[in-house]
Image (cartoon, rainbow, N blue to C red):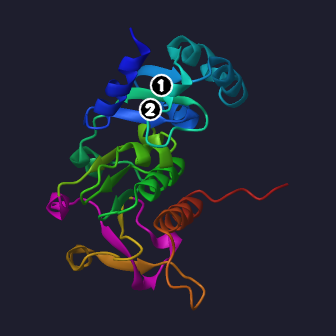
């Protein structure tokens, strides 16, 4: 196989809704750890990739070594608009996720709903936080695909650790067997201990906030207590604040001896 054929394959994969482009070592690492089907791995320096794997993911050393194909640096630079500094990229199958199944999950864990997020890197950071908090899933609305490469990069590949899917509009929330909570500056101050563990927690973008339609559907509105004069938080920071307030309230940390 000619290494140059990687360039059109990686280009087509960016437009293929069944594939994921993993840019960098951490997305590849997490994808493999959480069961992704990785189809191919390209690296500009296999020796450096081996050293990086031995340092950061020794549990994956054999698998990454078996998958990795060293390519000319000039070829590697054409596989992405901004090639990762770690010198590794991969193609993997996307994980099929049914939004209805996410909402029907019976675990005592919330669902994060991002209404029309605009920044793909920030969207990915929300997925990363959600995976760390072990929520039931992340759902998005709007025109951006949450599996786009920039979002996967921002999430460090943790789309494979938590269900991630796009909703076809807010109508998909009806019927909803979970309380819908709008995280909104005009809401009541957040009480982590009172959060329903199966709530859908809806977050809007920093500039536009939540839509009137979503707020009208919400069972309640909650706000993140902040210092006066601070107008808003970054979207991923807001998601992190609410999720870990919930998580710590539900699972108190034992005091140090």
Residue at (68, 28) in percent of width and height? 52
Would you identify the image quadrant in which residue 1 lies?
top left
Residue at (85, 54) in percent of width and height? 257
Q: Are marks 2 and 1 in contact (CB under 8 Å)?
A: yes
Q: Image height check: is 139 above or below 36? A: below
Percent coordinates x, y for residue 246 in the rendering: 52, 64
Percent coordinates x, y for residue 214 in the rendering: 24, 73
Residue sticking out furthest to the right? 257
Q: Is residue 197 left or right of residue 191?
A: left
Whether residue 94 is visible, yes or no, is no
For numbered disc 2, what is the local secondary structure?
A: loop
Is residue 189 inside the magenta stretch? Answer: yes
For numbered disc 1, what is the local secondary structure?
A: helix
Q: Is residue 230 left or right of residue 160?
A: right
Residue at (48, 44) in percent of width and height? 153
Is residue 10 inside the magenta stretch? Answer: no
Q: Specify the segment rendered in magenta.
A: 169-197
For residue 78, which numbered disc appears in the image? 2
Percent coordinates x, y for residue 210 in the rendering: 31, 75
Question: In the rendered image, which residue does mark 1 sit on?
Answer: 75
Percent coordinates x, y for residue 256 in the rendering: 81, 56
Whole-angstrom CA distance, mark 2 to mark 1, is 5 Å
Q: Image height check: is 54 above or below 85? A: above
């Amino acid at each position: 196989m000619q290494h140059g054929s990687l360039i059109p394959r990686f280009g087509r994969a960016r437009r293929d809704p069944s594939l994921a482009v993993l840019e960098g070592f951490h997305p590849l690492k997490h994808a493999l750890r959480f069961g992704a089907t990785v189809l191919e791995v390209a690296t500009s320096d296999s020796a450096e990739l081996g050293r990086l794997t031995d340092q950061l993911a020794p549990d994956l050393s054999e698998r990454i070594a078996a998958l990795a194909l060293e390519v000319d640096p000039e070829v590697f630079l054409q596989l992405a608009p901004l090639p990762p500094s770690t010198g590794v990229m991969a193609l993997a199958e996307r994980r099929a996720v049914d939004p209805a199944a996410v909402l029907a999950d019976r675990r005592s864990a919330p669902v994060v709903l991002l209404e029309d997020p605009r920044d793909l890197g920030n969207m990915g950071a929300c997925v990363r936080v959600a995976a760390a908090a072990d929520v039931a899933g992340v759902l998005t609305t709007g025109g951006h695909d949450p599996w786009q490469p920039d979002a996967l990069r921002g999430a460090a590949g943790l789309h494979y650790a938590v269900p991630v899917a796009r909703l076809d509009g807010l109508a998909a929330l009806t019927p909803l067997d979970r309380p819908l909570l709008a995280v909104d500056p005009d809401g009541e101050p957040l009480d982590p201990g009172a959060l329903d563990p199966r709530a859908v927690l809806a977050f809007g973008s920093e500039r536009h906030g939540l839509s009137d339609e979503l707020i009208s559907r919400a069972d309640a509105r909650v706000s993140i207590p902040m210092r006066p004069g601070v107008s808003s938080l970054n979207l991923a920071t807001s998601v992190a604040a609410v999720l870990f307030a919930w998580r710590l309230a539900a699972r108190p940390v034992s005091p140090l001896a």
